[in-house]
Structures are given as C-alpha cells and as structure tokens.
C-alpha cells in the first residue's frame, strides 16, 4: 500500500503509445513501456498517468480506464500511481476519480479548470476568482476517496498562488496531501518562490504535504527550497540520470558532502541543457518532442523500438517501433530540424544515463532472459512501412 503522502523522488508523467494505422493504444508496447520505467534498477518514485504528456484530451473514457489498468498491472507491487483527473466540469472530475479508485491509482491530481470569461471568475487573484476555486474544491474534495494533489500552472488550468493553495490545504485538512508546481503563464519565474512559500507553511520534515517541481531544470533549486522531488516529462527521456541527480543532492544534504554537491550541480546543468531542447517552445509540438526524445533511448531499452546497436544505442529513422511514438492526430509531429537538435542533445548527455552504458553484463542477462525485445519476431512491416502485429 502506498504511503498517505506521495514518496519523494522523481515521478514520470507517462506517455501513451498509439498504433497509427489503427488509431488505438498499442497494448503490448504500452505494457512493456510501463514495466521498464517502473523497474527497480531505474528507481523512479512513481507514475503520473493521464497527465498532459499522455495526450489525455484525445483519449476516450475507456482508453483512460485502460491506461490506468495497464499501468497497475504492469508495475511491481507497491509502486505508486497518481491519476490526473482534471477536467472542465466537476461532474467529469468525479467520474475520473471513480475510475482512479476502480483501476488502482493511489492518488489523484486535480487542476482547477480555466474558465476564461465566465462571469463569476473575476480577475486573477480577485474575490470572484478565489470563490470559484474554493467552490470547485469544495465539490471535489469530499467526493474523493483518494488523497489529492493540486496541480498549478497546468496546461489549460488556473495558475494558483501559494496563498490560495495554502488556504485550500487548511480548508480540507488531511485530504490534500501535495502540490505539483509547474511553470505558469508567466514563464515560471516564481516557481521556486512558490515552492519556498509552501515549504514554509508545510515543512517537509512533518511529512504531511509533498511539493513537487514541474521540470527537472529547477529540481536542485526546488529541493533546496523544500520540494520533495519532481514530476517531469523529462523522466521519460532520461529517467536514470534524473534519479541519480536527485539522490546525489539528497545524499549531499545529509552528509554535507561538497563533492556530491558539485556532482549534483554538474548533472543539473547538463540535463537542463538537454531538457531545453526537448521542451523549448512549450505548447508548439511539446508532446511530439517529448515522445520523439523518449523513443531514442528509453524506447529501445523498454523493448518497444527494435534494431538499435552500439554503446550509445540511439534510434534513427527506419527502426521498427518508432511509429508508436508519434502523437495522436490532430497533434502534429515536430520538424526534422527540431528532431536533429533533440537527437544531438540526448546523444551529448547519454554518459549520464549509465544504464546500460556502464552495465553491459546486465543488458546481456536481460536479453538472454527475454526481458528485452521479447516480441521481435512478431513484428513485420506492412506496405505503409508501419509495424504490423
């Protein structure tokens, strides 16, 4: 059973793998992907399923349910799962909460919907705005049988101030157990400040409220300010390196080790440079960029992309399985120029992703035991160039 407050560390908001000709979720590939990312030798703290990176607005309710069920059945026992249940109406949110309970999630993540010019919203920070937010959570929180995290700065949601989050947590004592602090519309300049203010109100040592940064490029700053970790799309791309960075910083704090501190800062700078290429121009093909970057290395390690070889096994055009990492229409793919930049950035930082670069024997054992590329023989290309199952 998962702890009441989400455990600290790196959480991955997982992507969805579609079979383009069928326009449906690829069942086998999705399960392989969940299995790999949740493996103990990577060390992720948990999954956020049905977040922005899963292309949730493009999923039917049965597909949402399938992703939750698949995630729960694919991960090892005790691995925690958050389900994003954000939606435009409170009725939809309640339905999604029921699905989260039914299909094995441990926590739900809620972002209050952005209501635009709705008359009772008022201006940002005004009385109408705050009343709308309180009314929304007054409806949702008593209904949920799972602990709730507030997501602020989410795509399409309100960017709540730290003061408003504090009021909501105190208003619903014991039911709201964390916050996912993403960059808001202002570019994220106050993100670490928001983490700092929340950590002052809810000290991490009390273990009653967990604060998670929304991107890894300010993970070290967030941890220094009181964050418990990070929920970041980049955990799909270079999961082990992020986990390593997290533990280097945490161990440095405990041991006051200057060498580990220097390591954590060095890793942070390198990963931030790569993440910038993947998440640059957020909102303009961001999901497609994340999925492409994920296919290059993690997709191969999961056994979804077939045919890569060498010490740095980056995928390139022509490998089977890459088509599963395309976004669902109407989302568009990123340009060839953008893909080249991402490829170079990931390749540059792969020495951080030590698995399997520093562990060839582990890789050989996994392949020998059939844990990687287990369905290579079942995949053939059809006339369109896509993989046919």
Image (cartoon, grey):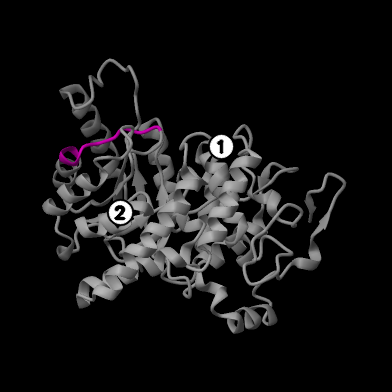
- What residue is disc 2 on? 212
Percent position of residue 365, x then y: 63, 83
- Is 210 situated above or below 50? below
Q: Residue at x 34, y 21 (%)?
A: 116
In depth, the one of 252 and 33 nearer the eye is 252
- What residue is disc 1 on? 58
Percent position of residue 112, x then y: 32, 35
Is 345 colored magenta in this rendering? no
Q: Residue at x 44, y 66 (%)?
A: 241
SS for callout 2: strand
- Is 172 situated above or below 1? above
In depth, the one of 386 and 319 nearer the eye is 319
Residues at marks 2 and 1 touching, judged by CB atoms closer than 8 Å: no
Cα distance between the residues tagged 2 and 1? 26 Å
Let me know if residue 74 appears in the view: no
Image position of 110 (left or right of 48): left
What segment carries the magenta color?
A: 156-164
């Amino acid at each position: 059973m998962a702890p009441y407050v989400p455990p600290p560390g790196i959480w991955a908001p997982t992507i969805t793998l579609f079979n383009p000709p069928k326009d449906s979720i690829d069942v086998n590939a999705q399960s392989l992907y969940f299995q790999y990312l949740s493996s103990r030798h990577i060390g992720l703290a948990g999954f956020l399923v049905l977040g922005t990176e899963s292309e949730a607005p493009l999923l039917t309710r049965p597909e949402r349910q399938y992703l939750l069920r698949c995630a729960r059945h694919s991960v090892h026992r005790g691995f925690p799962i958050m389900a994003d249940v954000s939606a435009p109406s409170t009725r939809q949110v309640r339905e999604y909460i029921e699905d989260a309970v039914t299909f094995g999630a441990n926590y739900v993540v809620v972002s209050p919907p952005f209501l635009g010019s709705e008359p009772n919203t008022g201006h940002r920070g005004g009385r109408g705005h705050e009343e709308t937010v309180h009314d929304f959570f007054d409806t949702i929180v008593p209904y949920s049988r799972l602990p709730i995290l507030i997501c602020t700065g989410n795509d399409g949601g309100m960017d709540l101030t730290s003061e408003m989050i504090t009021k909501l947590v105190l208003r619903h004592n014991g039911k709201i157990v964390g916050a996912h602090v993403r960059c808001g519309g202002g570019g994220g300049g106050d993100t670490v400040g928001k983490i700092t203010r929340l950590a002052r109100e809810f000290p991490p040592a009390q273990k009653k409220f967990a604060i998670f940064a929304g991107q890894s490029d300010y993970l070290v700053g967030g941890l220094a300010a009181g964050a418990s970790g990070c929920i970041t799309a980049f955990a799909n791309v270079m999961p082990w390196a992020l986990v390593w960075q997290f533990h280097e910083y945490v161990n440095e704090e405990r041991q006051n080790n200057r060498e580990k501190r220097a390591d954590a800062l060095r890793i942070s700078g390198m990963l931030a440079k790569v993440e910038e290429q993947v998440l640059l121009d957020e909102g303009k093909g961001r999901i497609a960029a994340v999925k492409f970057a994920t296919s290059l290395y993690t997709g191969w390690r999961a056994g979804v992309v077939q045919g890569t070889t060498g010490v740095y096994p980056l995928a390139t055009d022509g490998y089977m399985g890459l088509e599963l990492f395309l976004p669902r229409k109407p989302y568009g793919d990123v340009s060839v120029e953008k893909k080249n930049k991402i490829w170079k950035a990931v390749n540059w930082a792969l020495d951080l992703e030590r698995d399997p670069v520093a562990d060839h024997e582990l890789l050989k054992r996994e392949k020998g035991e059939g844990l990687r590329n287990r369905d290579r023989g079942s995949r053939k290309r059809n006339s369109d160039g896509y993989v046919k199952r």
